[in-house]
Image (cartoon, rainbow, N blue to C red):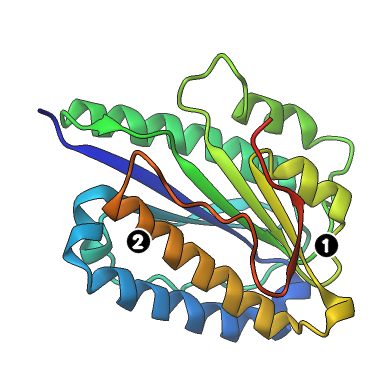
Amino acid sequence: MRNRVLPFYVVCDESYSMTDHMDTLRARLRELHHCIRANPVVSTVVRVCLIGFADTARLVVPLSAPHDMDDIGTFSTRAASNFGAVFTLLRETIERDVAELRAQSYDIHRPIVFFLSDGQPTDPAMWQHPYARLVEPAWPDRPKIVAFGIGDADPVTIRAVGEFKAFVADQNGGTSPGEALDQFAQTLADSMLSAATSPDRIDLPEQVRGYTAIRTHCC
């Protein structure tokens, strides 16, 4: 029987509005890395890729087993929030990664994307087309997208991006951006650990402390 792997894509906004939160994000992702790297079961199932986006989208860490990753916290800040660019890069990256994994005789679980933004798209009239290609129903490797909005993120946009599940930080309930990032990283870690132990029944969140769920099931 061939080994099966599950690719996780962590997509983070690197726009200037994230400047005050970037140190926290880097620290939480490094803690996540230590957590999943210490679990030998995770490395047999989970593969992780980090992508950042601002005026352009970039591959921060290519898809790798956790024990092969040197650093998971290398995000920076730049201008703008080009959603279209990151959805284009995601489609291209997933296609390439899945082809390489299959060439290595792996079976692939449908990829999962954790998307985090604290702002609004600077290409509001342009991002829908590359997004539609990313979640195209006819594409068998289309990812399940779990979207998180913090700060000034637009709930309508976050709900549209999170076609599987979507959450916005509960600012009225006193959730600070730092606390929201803590819960984002913890939810991501819990999901990866769940995938490692039960990849056919991945425990993606229905609720996240400090967030309001605005989509809780797949379309």
Q: Quadrant of the C terminus?
A: top right
Three-letter code for the amino acid on which mark 1 is drawn:
Ala
Residue 110 figure quarter:
top left
| Callout 1 secondary element | loop
Is residue 51 visible from the viewing direction of this image?
A: yes
Give the distance between the C-alpha atoms of the residues marked 2 and 1, in whole angstroms.
Answer: 28 Å
**Would you say 123 lies left or right of 201 here?**
right
Q: In this view of the protein, which residue sits in the foreground, 53 or 144? A: 144
Q: In this view of the protein, which residue sits in the foreground, 144 or 57? A: 144
**Which residue is found at the position 27% from the left and 41% from the top?**
5
The answer to whether residue 123 is above or below residue 177 is above
Residue carrying label 2: 193
Callout 2 crowding tier (Cα within 10 Å): few <14, some 14–19, many ≥20: many
Callout 1 crowding tier (Cα within 10 Å): few <14, some 14–19, many ≥20: some
**Which residue is found at the position 61% from the left and 51% from the top?**
57
The answer to whether residue 119 is above or below residue 104 is below
Contact? badges 2 and 1 (CB < 8 Å)? no
Looking at the rendered structure, which numbered label has been put on residue 13?
Answer: none
Q: Position of residue 142 (x, y in %)?
A: 52, 29
Which label lies toward us, 2 or 1? 2
Q: Position of residue 70 (x, y in %)?
A: 28, 71
Three-letter code for the amino acid on which mark 2 is drawn:
Leu
Q: Position of residue 19 (x, y in %)?
A: 71, 80
Is residue 62 visible from the viewing direction of this image?
A: no
Q: Reading the chain from its start, which is encountered first: label 2 or label 1?
A: 1
Looking at the rendered structure, which numbered label has been put on residue 153?
Answer: 1
**Would you say 182 lies left or right of 30 here?**
right
Farthest left residue in view? 1
**Which residue is found at the position 31% from the left and 48% from the top?**
198
